[in-house]
Image (spheres, rainbow, N blue to C red):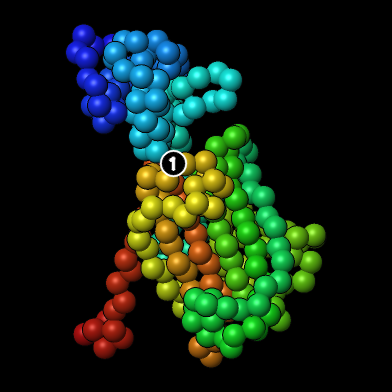
């Protein structure tokens, strides 16, 4: 630790953050106990815990019950392939990466009626997916589709659907169009809990809407990834007019 004696929580957080980012405190290393740190910085444990809470919220420090505070190790990133609306097949095929799926039927309400262009109360199949590597969550998906379009036996013996879940892909037949809206934002409390991230850690949010050739919305997916655990790659395919090609 440094010889300086910062007194306010954000000063202590700045000092610890600098030591973490410069490598003086290594990933996976356990910090001294809160009592020792409080004595070192000449502050109360309450003040010290506020500083640690700021670092925990940023995802730099993880508090493990009964063991102490540890510097988080960098997470292996997965790749989201924009335009195809899936996780990279090689990433999704990693043996250590598994996806849990829960399904239910919900009535359409709020923004779901707008996304799927259905009346309020229409039955929707909802699939909640959580992608986890060992004990580290990598992605969260809520996939909705009109109940009459949900594939039969989707969680039982339908291997194609299981592969789609593993890649967070469109569940039904290939759609005619897929529109993806991407942004970064703070996580909701439920997302922070499911993804095991701090409330101040940004997430990559993808809203994906797929339609068939008649213009009917066949699926809407709300995908959420921790910002430090995903790369999103978008490839632009140039469309050449037939007359230009002939010229």
The number of callouts visible is: 1
With 144 as the anchor, is 154 left or right in this view?
Answer: right
Residue at 43% across, 62% down: 206
Residue 183 position by quadrant: bottom left
With 153 as the anchor, is 235 left or right in this view?
Answer: left
Measuring from the top left, give residue 70's x and y in whole percent: 45, 22
Local secondary structure at mark 1: loop
Residue 137 position by quadrant: top right
Please indicate, yes or no, whether residue 241 appears anywhere in the rendered image.
yes
26 lies above or below 170? above
78 lies above or below 104? above
Q: Nearer the viewer, residue 197 or 149?
A: 197
Residue at 45% across, 34% down: 75
Please indicate, yes or no, whether residue 116 appears anywhere in the rendered image.
no
- The quarter of the image holding the C terminus is bottom left
31 lies above or below 62? above
Residue at 45% across, 67% down: 207
Residue at 66% across, 77% down: 107
Measuring from the top left, give residue 181's x and y in whole percent: 38, 68
Outermost bottom residue? 214
Q: Which residue is mark 1?
A: 198
Q: Nearer the viewer, residue 121 or 25?
A: 121
- The quarter of the image holding the N terminus is top left
Pointer 1: residues within 10 angstroms few (<14), some, or many (20+)?
A: many
With 51 as the anchor, is 108 left or right in this view?
Answer: right
Measuring from the top left, give residue 222's x and y in whole percent: 51, 64
With 42 as the anchor, is 221 left or right in this view?
Answer: right
Measuring from the top left, give residue 88's x and y in whole percent: 49, 52
């Amino acid at each position: 630790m440094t010889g300086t004696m910062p007194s306010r929580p954000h000063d202590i957080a700045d000092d610890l953050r600098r030591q973490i980012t410069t490598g003086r405190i290594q990933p996976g290393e356990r910090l001294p106990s809160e009592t020792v740190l409080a004595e070192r910085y000449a502050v109360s444990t309450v003040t010290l815990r506020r500083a640690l809470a700021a670092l925990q919220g940023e995802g730099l420090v993880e508090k493990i019950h009964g063991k102490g505070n540890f510097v988080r190790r960098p997470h292996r990133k997965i790749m989201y392939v924009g335009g195809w609306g899936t996780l990279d097949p090689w990433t999704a095929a990693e043996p250590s990466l598994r996806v849990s799926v829960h399904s239910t039927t919900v009535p359409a309400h709020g923004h779901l009626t707008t996304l799927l262009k259905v009346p309020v109360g229409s039955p929707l199949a909802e699939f909640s997916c959580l992608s986890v590597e060992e004990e580290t969550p990598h992605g969260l998906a809520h996939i909705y589709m009109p109940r009459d379009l949900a594939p039969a036996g989707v969680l039982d013996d339908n291997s194609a659907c299981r592969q789609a879940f593993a890649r967070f892909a469109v569940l039904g037949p290939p759609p005619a169009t897929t529109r993806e809206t991407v942004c970064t934002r703070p996580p909701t409390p439920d997302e922070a809990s499911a993804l095991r991230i701090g409330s101040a850690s940004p997430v990559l949010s993808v809203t994906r809407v797929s339609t068939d050739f008649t213009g009917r919305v066949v699926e809407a997916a709300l995908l959420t990834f921790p910002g430090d655990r995903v790369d999103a790659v978008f490839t632009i395919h140039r469309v050449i007019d037939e007359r230009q090609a002939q010229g």
